[in-house]
Image (cartoon, rainbow, N blue to C red):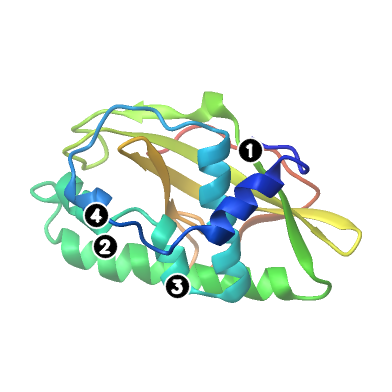
Amino acid sequence: MLAPAALAPALALALCAPASATGPSPGSLPQTSTEPGFTAGLDAQMAILWRAIRSDSMSLGQTVFFPRGAYLQMKTGAIPDPKSDYADRLIGFFDLDLAAYHRLIIAGNPSTLLRVGVNPADAKWIPAGVCENKIGYWHVPGVRLVFRRGTAVESVEVASLMSWRGVWYVVHLGPNPRPANAGTVDDFLNGPGVPGPAGGC
């Protein structure tokens, strides 16, 4: 987790990074048990997510969303129709949530991302066979985007991140489950809030 001053290099990296890297899609490659880090790599991913929220850009947001190919590897044979589940549920809700977060964050004064709040102790390896998954992965819930709007410090939650090949990806931006099939901002607070709690998969 970076302090506000140290977040600038990660933001600069994210601003300069291409929307997609050359080479094979990560989702086409096999999973590894490498636990993703909680410093520059996570901060860079969340800086891209922040840009996607600010611009309401689904195309940019999908660059930090859990890869489709990886999801199909994990779910094929474990649930009835993983392709539809990915497109209709995961991506469908992500699109709605991105717009909801955008409306909240651009309201009022201009906002600036200060830091990413995460508790590394909340991360857990979810083994194969648990939560209808054929392949294991690292999971961390309740990552917080802490931002300044005018003179106020506020925060929102990114509900759930999952690993693929040692990289954190968003799998649920808003809450999962949620009270209604609509875009939903998770745990908006005045102040930085507290990451977590641990749990889920």
Height in image: 167 above or below 100? above
Height in image: 98 above or below 172? below
Point out the residue furthest to the right here.
151
- Regarding mark 2 in the picture, which secondary structure is present there? helix
Look at the image and tell me whether residue 116 can be seen. Answer: yes
Task: Check residue 58 in the rendering and tell me which mark sits there, or answer none.
Answer: 3
- Regarding mark 4 in the picture, which secondary structure is present there? loop
Q: Is residue 200 left or right of residue 14?
A: left
Mark closest to the chain's N terminus, 3 or 2: 3
Residues packed near mark 3 inside 10 Å, few (<14), some (14 to 19) or many (20 plus): some
Residue 76, how many percent across, how many down? 11, 51
Mark closest to the chain's N terminus, 1 or 3: 3
- Regarding mark 1 in the picture, which secondary structure is present there? loop
Q: Which residue is mark 1?
A: 195
Q: Quadrant of the C terminus?
A: top left
Residue at mark 2 to residue at mark 1: CA–CA distance: 26 Å
In which quadrant of the rendered view does residue 142 lie? Answer: top right
Task: Check residue 25 in the rendering and tell me which mark sits there, or answer none.
Answer: 4
Discs 1/3, front: 3
Task: Check residue 86 in the rendering and tell me which mark sits there, or answer none.
Answer: 2
Residue at mark 3 to residue at mark 4: CA–CA distance: 18 Å
- Given residues 58 and 133, the one toward you in this image is 58
Residue at mark 4 to residue at mark 1: CA–CA distance: 30 Å
Three-letter code, disc 3: Met
Residue 117, how many percent across, how many down? 65, 40
Q: Is residue 7 left or right of residue 91?
A: right
Q: Are marks 2 and 1 in contact (CB under 8 Å)?
A: no
Three-letter code, disc 1: Pro
Q: Quadrant of the N terminus?
A: top right
Three-letter code, disc 4: Ser
Residue at screen point 29% across, 55% down: 67
Residues packed near mark 2 inside 10 Å, few (<14), some (14 to 19) or many (20 plus): many
